[in-house]
Amino acid sequence: MEGQKQTNFTFEIDNFSEKESVIASPQFSSSGCKWFVKVYPKGNRVEDHLSLFLHVANPKSLRLGWKRRASFSFILLNQSGKEIHRTYESPCNLFFAQLQGRGFPKAVPLKKLQEKGFLEKNKLIIKVEVKVIEVVDAAQVTGKETMDVCGFQVLYSQAFRVTWIFEEHPDIAVNFKPKSQLVKTTYMNILLGLIDTLNKLPHSLSETELSNAQSVLIDLTEAGFKLDWLKTKLDDVYLERKKIADGSRVKELEEQVKNLKAELNKEKIKSAAAKVFSLEETMCNLCRAELNNENIETIPSDSDFRKLTSLYNKLMNATLLLFRGIRYLDGKGMVIDSCMFEMSKM
């Protein structure tokens, strides 16, 4: 069968060590389908590996509903054509409109490329082996079509997410072995729902949602899914919510302290005003005592008037200083104390 024939395609990249951005190979055909390879010299989603991906060429020219299934692997060759590195074969990969490329983010460690024999004359030679298993050029799309992704029948709209899950966590379902496809699909939908919940912002999740997520995680784990990574994510959500709650409590306490300071300042102002009135009364009493000491029994002389005027001026100056103290009290603390010091020198 033509769909089972293997196609080999080899291409070269000169001055490879100088390359930084992604490199696209020339197109080639396999089982009537056009393909090309993307090379990431500095890695894709990783920084310490060479990344290699097989892509469907010209996907926009294909009819709605197209898909491809293919197995492939990459081989690095030296100048004499000898194999020096090979990736494992990636079996039965599904390509479709939402997932046009598949491959190996960690194809080769960059350190290994620097070893003797890999980059002769600074040239990288890459060979890709492709075996196309299935070709669908068009299909009537209603939005309810399903496809098989790693043994699970999922909607086309879910295929990209499910594929990503199995690429990131290949052993996620090794212990999940129900015979019913309906049961498998149901569990996969529950898993996708759990991931959606945990991808929300922590502060937007209610306690009920978190409690349900905890229960669902337990059920999926007991069914055979390996979900340590989701448990870690759930723990992180709880921790983030605790930080948010602690931060809110700190802000609440800061606001209470601010209000208490405002009340304290009001009390200080009231206390300072009371001191002014008390001191004014004291000064009046001193004036009376001074006059009594002078035994003024007749019409006051010019000297008496000067004494009275002096006492009056002292009283007014003292009152003015105290009121200044009240005015600056809120912004500069107890200025009233310095005013009292000035008064003591009168």
Image: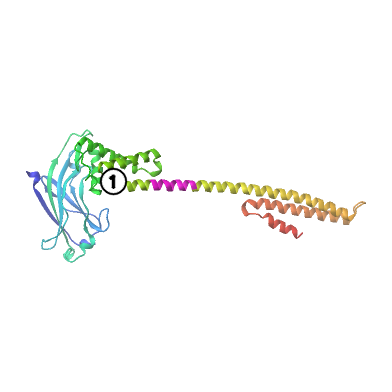
In this view of the protein, which residue sits in the foreground, 296 or 235?
A: 235
Q: Residue at x 69, y 49 (%)?
A: 271
Image quadrant in which the C terminus is located? bottom right
Which residue is nearer to you in this view: 237 or 90?
237
Q: Residues within 10 Å of mark 1 (few under 14, many from 20)?
A: some
Q: Which region of the structure is painted magenta?
A: 238-249
Amino acid found under the numbered disc labelled 1:
Leu
Q: Where is residue 6 in the image (x, y as percent from the top left)?
A: 9, 49
Label 1 sits on a secondary structure element that is loop
- Image coordinates of residue 215 in percent, x first then y, are 33, 40
* Quadrant hosting residue 193: top left
> Which residue is located at x 69 percent, y 52 percent?
324
Q: Which residue is drawn at 66% across and 49% down?
A: 269
Residue topped by disc 1:
227
Relative to residue 311, is residue 227 depicted above or below? above
- Return the x and y of residue 279 as percentages of the image width and height: 75, 51
Magenta span contains residue 247: yes
Q: Is residue 206 visible?
A: no
Whether residue 279 is in magenta: the answer is no
Q: Residue 77 location in percent, x, y?
A: 14, 60
Instruction: Give the dominant element type of the magenta stretch: helix, strand or loop.
Output: helix
